[in-house]
Amino acid sequence: MGFYRSVVLPRLCHLAMRNRGLLPYRERVVGAAEGRVLEIGVGSGLNLPFYRESVREVLGLEPAPQLIAMARETARGTRTPAAFIGGSAEAIPLDDRSVDTIVTTWTLCTILDASRALGEMRRVLRPAGRLLFVEHGLAPDAGVRRWQDWLTPAWRRISGGCHLNRPIQAMIESSGFRVDRIETGYMPGPKPMSFMYEGSARPD
């Protein structure tokens, strides 16, 4: 089980996130980042090529050592300075109000205590900063929601703790953020896994 969690699962997650259908989301969300950026769950670094000149530095937070090693390799081929921090979003090892932008892409679904993690994000974000996000989560359609609720217990066990049924916008807003842009909708694929929330939020 230890080998599966530390080696096999991170590599499976890496392959899943390489889905070309996710590229437009990455381009829009990551491309809007500015200044000193904290990326939550940087994974293998798939977002790193999408940061623009407006970004001074990327700090990639990631709990899986195997993925940090992969992210370092990815960073070598990009122009944006990047540093990597091994750790959990529930206890971000950064000072208060120390980053300009926080980026989270398909990460809030897997964090065990997402509310605590969002509180930590608010703590380290500067008052004028932004949280940029794209996440999959709870769908508006009752039939899809029933499938999400039914599938989530088994899905969590095979997908690194991923929840299909988290109400992303409500979670963000209840953690001290004001959502100032939100777009939702299904991307191509099975509906229980493909309802997307894309937007930005500021400390309230």
Image (tube, rainbow, N blue to C red):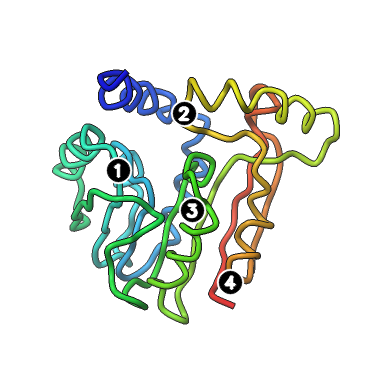
Mark in front: 4 vs 3: 4
**Upstream in the sequence, badge 2 or badge 3?**
2
Residue placed furthest toward the right? 142
SS category of the residue bearing label 3 = helix
Q: CA distance from mark 1 to mark 3?
A: 22 Å
The residue that disc 4 covers is: 176
Structural crowding at the residue carrying mark 4, measured as other residues with C-alpha within 10 Å and reported as few (<14), some (14–19) or many (≥20): some
**Upstream in the sequence, badge 1 or badge 2?**
2
Q: Quadrant of the N terminus?
A: top left
Q: CA distance from mark 1 to mark 2?
A: 25 Å
SS category of the residue bearing label 4 = loop
Seen in the picture, residue 73 relative to 39 is either above or below; the reply is above
Q: Residue at x 60, y 40 (%)?
A: 136
**Left or right for 125, reference 178:** left
The residue that disc 1 covers is: 63
**Left or right for 23, reference 145:** left
The residue that disc 2 covers is: 20
Seen in the picture, residue 82 relative to 53 is either above or below; the reply is above
> Do tag 2 and tag 3 residues touch (Cβ < 8 Å)?
no
> Do tag 1 and tag 2 residues touch (Cβ < 8 Å)?
no
Identify which amino acid the numbered label 4 is placed on.
Gly
Mark in front: 1 vs 3: 1
Q: CA distance from mark 2 to mark 3?
A: 15 Å
**Upstream in the sequence, badge 4 or badge 1?**
1
**Left or right for 80, reference 25:** left
Front residue of this view, candidates 102 and 53: 102
Identify which amino acid the numbered label 3 is placed on.
Val
The residue that disc 3 covers is: 29
Identify which amino acid the numbered label 2 is placed on.
Arg
Q: Quadrant of the C terminus?
A: bottom right
Structural crowding at the residue carrying mark 2, measured as other residues with C-alpha within 10 Å and reported as few (<14), some (14–19) or many (≥20): few
